[in-house]
Image: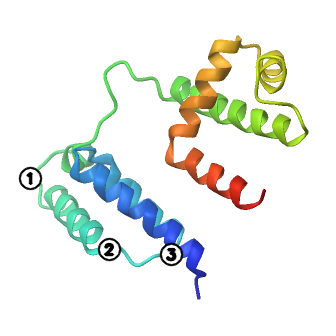
């Protein structure tokens, strides 16, 4: 049986993905399928119905590719490896800032930011941007909630 906090978190993520999908982010449907598979959840109706509809378009040769069926594609000039490296680095910088704070350094230019800049070879503005951008994500918000819960 799933505990109430975890269940609320999982449902919150699905609610957010549904909102993103309804607001035009077609990749949110695939993210929701992945989320349900990863957590072994029964797919909500909106996920199951939309997935079946889009997938059947491809199965029935109404479209040429799965990208076309799900109305998703990477932007022109998108380089997957470069983007992945940037995302990974942003994630690593964020975690390094939190770790420095856990050790007692303030999140300031003279504290955690300075340490992270040296470690990753970036400037203060870049470190702050990575920290702030990650905090805005659903993942970053979840981490902030967990940190506050354990304070």
Label 1 secondary element: loop
Instruction: Examine the rendered structure and indicate whether residue 3 appears above or below residue 93.
Output: below
> Is residue 77 or residue 142 the one in the foreground?
142
Using the numbered discs, state the Cα–Cα distance from disc 2 to disc 3 in whole angstroms.
12 Å
Q: Earlier in the sequence, mark 1 or mark 3?
A: 3
Label 3 secondary element: loop
Q: Report which residue position mark 3 lands on.
A: 40
Instruction: Examine the rendered structure and indicate whether residue 39 appears above or below residue 21.
Output: below
Q: Report which residue position mark 1 lands on.
A: 62
Q: Report which residue position mark 2 lands on.
A: 44
> Is residue 69 or residue 97 the one in the foreground?
97
Using the numbered discs, state the Cα–Cα distance from disc 1 to disc 3 in whole angstroms.
30 Å
Q: Give me the residue at 64% from left, 49% from top.
A: 144
Q: Find residue 110 and report its horizontal and vertical position in percent.
A: 83, 17
Q: Quadrant of the N terminus?
A: bottom right
Q: Find residue 18 and report its horizontal and vertical position in percent.
A: 30, 58
Q: Earlier in the sequence, mark 2 or mark 1?
A: 2
Q: Give me the residue at 50% from left, 48% from top.
A: 138
């Amino acid at each position: 049986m799933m505990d109430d906090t975890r269940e609320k978190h999982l449902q919150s993520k699905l609610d957010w993905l549904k909102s993103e999908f309804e607001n035009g982010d077609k990749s949110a449907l695939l993210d929701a399928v992945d989320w349900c598979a990863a957590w072994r959840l029964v797919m909500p109706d909106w996920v199951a119905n939309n997935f079946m509809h889009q997938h059947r378009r491809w199965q029935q040769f109404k479209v040429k590719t799965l990208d076309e069926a799900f109305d998703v594609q990477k932007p022109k000039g998108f380089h997957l490896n470069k983007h992945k490296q940037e995302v990974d680095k942003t994630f690593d910088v964020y975690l390094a800032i939190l770790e420095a704070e856990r050790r007692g350094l303030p999140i300031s230019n003279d504290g955690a930011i300075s340490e992270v800049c040296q470690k990753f070879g970036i400037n203060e503005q870049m470190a702050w941007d990575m920290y702030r951008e990650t905090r805005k994500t659903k993942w970053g918000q979840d981490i902030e909630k967990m940190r506050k819960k354990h304070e």
